[in-house]
Image (cartoon, rainbow, N blue to C red):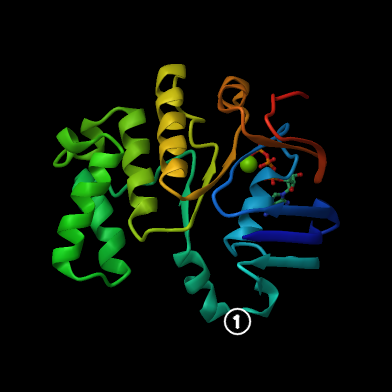
């Protein structure tokens, strides 16, 4: 699904990503760990087209993304759902409306939106918060709305960059369980995190980054620095 071939990304004269070779297959759950500044977010930004590759090739579903014109980037993004540390929900919209809005923007018909949003809110365990506003929800609940929103256009890949960065341990584990459930339902998941306990619990593939390079690969990994 994703293939990096000797990819380098440089900001001014600083190499944020250097000579990365990496392949991620459909259906995988991959954690990316490493100290602050190691290049985790940059790696993810290259995949969803927020930053461009300077050297090497990056293929997504066999498409060389360097060959995409700027106007094609939205089509790439349609395959991908993105969740960040700060959830950026619309404050004046309910959980339902935040998710529905993402589908309206993508042009789905109204009856499909009504059907899908309640199904997605059920998957993320928020049925009873459907009509609550963000300031009436806990951090963990808000993050679940953000995940529901990222799933609204049925992405084949979910990218989560420090999704538990603002959450306590209990909520972090709940978000992790949810990401695993989403993965079991067939979506490829890429998780960047500092949270050692989370990665150790998953027992899935772990990629450790250090100074823009992959310093370690583990099939059923533990977070080591
Ligand atoms: N827009 C930018 N302009 C210049 N340098 C940048 C930019 N974004 C990132 N960098 C640099 O690239 C390197 C990698 O940053 P990146 O954000 O990918 O790290 P990270 O592993 O996600 O760190 P963190 O754990 O703190 O989120 C860092 O040295 C950072 O300072
Ligand atoms: Mg980061």
Residue 64, quarter of the rendered image: bottom right
Image location (x, y in percent) of residue 51: 65, 62
Viewer-closest of 91 and 35:
35
Q: Which residue: 57% across, 78% down?
A: 70
Name the image quarter holding the N terminus: bottom right
Q: Is residue 89 visible in this depiction of the protein? A: yes
Q: Which residue: 20% across, 40% down?
A: 133
Question: How many residues crowd around disc 1 within 10 Å: few (fewer than 14), some, or many (20 or more)?
Answer: few
Image location (x, y in percent) of residue 69: 60, 81
Residue 113, quarter of the rendered image: bottom left
Name the image quarter holding the C terminus: top right
Q: Is residue 98 above or below residue 203?
A: below
Residue 114 in the figure: left or right of residue 73: left
Residue 134 in the figure: left or right of residue 65: left
Return the residue at label 1: 69
Q: Is residue 89 above or below residue 162?
A: below
Q: Is residue 40 above or below residue 198?
A: below
Instruction: Give SS at disc 1.
Output: loop
Image location (x, y in percent) of residue 184: 45, 41
């Amino acid at each position: 699904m994703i293939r990096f071939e000797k990819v380098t990304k440089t900001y001014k004269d600083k190499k944020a990503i250097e000579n990365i070779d990496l392949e991620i297959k459909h259906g995988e759950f991959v954690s990316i760990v490493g100290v602050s500044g190691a290049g985790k977010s940059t790696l993810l930004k290259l995949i969803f087209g927020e930053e461009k590759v300077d050297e090497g090739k990056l293929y997504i579903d066999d498409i060389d993304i360097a060959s995409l014109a700027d106007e094609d980037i939205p089509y790439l993004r349609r395959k991908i759902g993105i969740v960040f540390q700060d959830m950026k929900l619309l404050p004046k919209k309910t959980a339902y409306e935040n998710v529905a809005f993402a589908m309206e923007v993508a042009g789905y018909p109204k009856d499909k939106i009504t059907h899908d949003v309640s199904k997605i809110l059920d998957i993320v365990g928020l049925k009873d918060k459907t009509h609550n506003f963000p300031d009436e929800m806990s951090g963990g609940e808000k993050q679940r709305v953000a995940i529901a929103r990222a799933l609204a256009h049925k992405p084949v890949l979910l990218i989560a960059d420090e999704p538990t960065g603002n959450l306590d341990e209990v909520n972090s584990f709940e978000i992790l369980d949810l990401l695993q459930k989403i993965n079991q339902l067939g979506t490829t998941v890429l998780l960047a995190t500092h949270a050692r306990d989370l990665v150790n619990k998953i027992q899935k593939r772990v990629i450790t980054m250090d100074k823009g390079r992959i310093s370690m690969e583990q099939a059923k990994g533990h977070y080591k620095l």
